[in-house]
Amino acid sequence: MPVRPPRGVAAHPARLGDNARMNQATLSPTSRQARPCGTAPVAQHLRPSPGRAWPAPLLLLALLAAVAAPVQAQPVAAPLDPDEAFYQRAASCAAAMQVDQLALAARARAGETGLRPEILHITRLGFAYVGTAYQRGLRDPRGSQMLKAATAEQKSWPEPRHRALTAECMVEAQKVYDEAGSVARWFVDMKATKRVDRFLNAAAPSASAASAAASR
């Protein structure tokens, strides 16, 4: 005659390796309820129960996600094109050196002598910067517009700021001139010489004008 186990005792004792809690979850009626498609059971345990606070690690992750979301949405500025950066620097330096060039020319027109080497030097450096920008693709009318804009911007600068920029630009322009090819340097020298000759010829009065001025 078979012996029945007492009430409350399982008919089959638990075997080694069985998980009683998992068996209970399997036999539980609530575990057999249908879940919506795509619902992850783990996500249910991540939501706090009513009246309970978020666990500290989950609260920290939520705060980090809220802070990082606006930062990721900000657009990243594209780096400036190297040629475009050179164009802007060439325009700024040409405008700064042109101020000193015109000041020297005005002194020459006033009758001061011995200024030709200094005028030729600064004119050569200005043409070196402008010529290299032309070789890299800068063309008019944009080149003239950039030079005009830089000149207008620097008009309100104090003298120390102008001197500092001119000193930097002359060092940079000398490097540009030294690194240029022999043909480019010949072209720059020719253009600079013609420009200086025009300055000095305009500064020196003609003989007829001088005699006319003396007879008055």
Image (cartoon, helix red, strand yellow):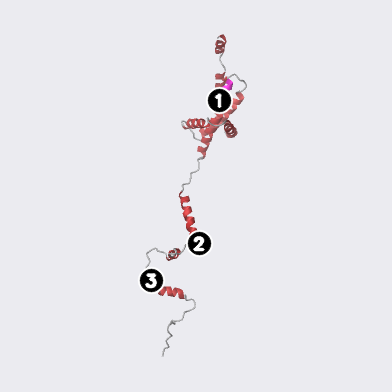
In the picture provided, is 193 more to the left or to the right than 50?
right
Q: Residues within 10 Å of mark 3 (few under 14, many from 20)?
A: few
Q: Is residue 213 above or below residue 189?
A: above
Q: Is residue 138 magenta?
A: no
Q: Report x, y in % for residue 124.
A: 57, 28
Which corner quadrant holds the C terminus?
Answer: top right
Q: Label for residue 32?
A: 3
Query: Residue at the location (48% across, 56% down)?
Result: 63
- Counting residues from the start of the chain, the first of labels 2 and 3 encountered is 3
- Counting residues from the start of the chain, the first of labels 1 and 3 encountered is 3
Magenta stretch in the rendered image? 102-108
Q: Report x, y in % for residue 192.
A: 56, 26
Q: Residue 112 is drawn in which quadrant? A: top right
Q: Residue 209 is drawn in which quadrant? A: top right
Is residue 189 among what the camera can see? no
| Disc 2, SS | helix
Residue at image mark 1: 102
The residues bearing labels 1 and 2 have C-alpha atoms spaced at a distance of: 71 Å
Q: Label for residue 56?
A: 2
Q: Inspect the image, locate mark 3, and give the three-letter code of the amino acid beneath it.
A: Arg
Residue closer to the observer: 116 or 28? 28
Residue closer to the observer: 53 or 189? 53
Residue ranking furthest to the top = 215
Q: Inspect the image, locate mark 2, and give the three-letter code of the amino acid beneath it.
A: Ala
Looking at the image, do the residues carrying marks 1 and 3 touch, with CB atoms under 8 Å apart?
Answer: no
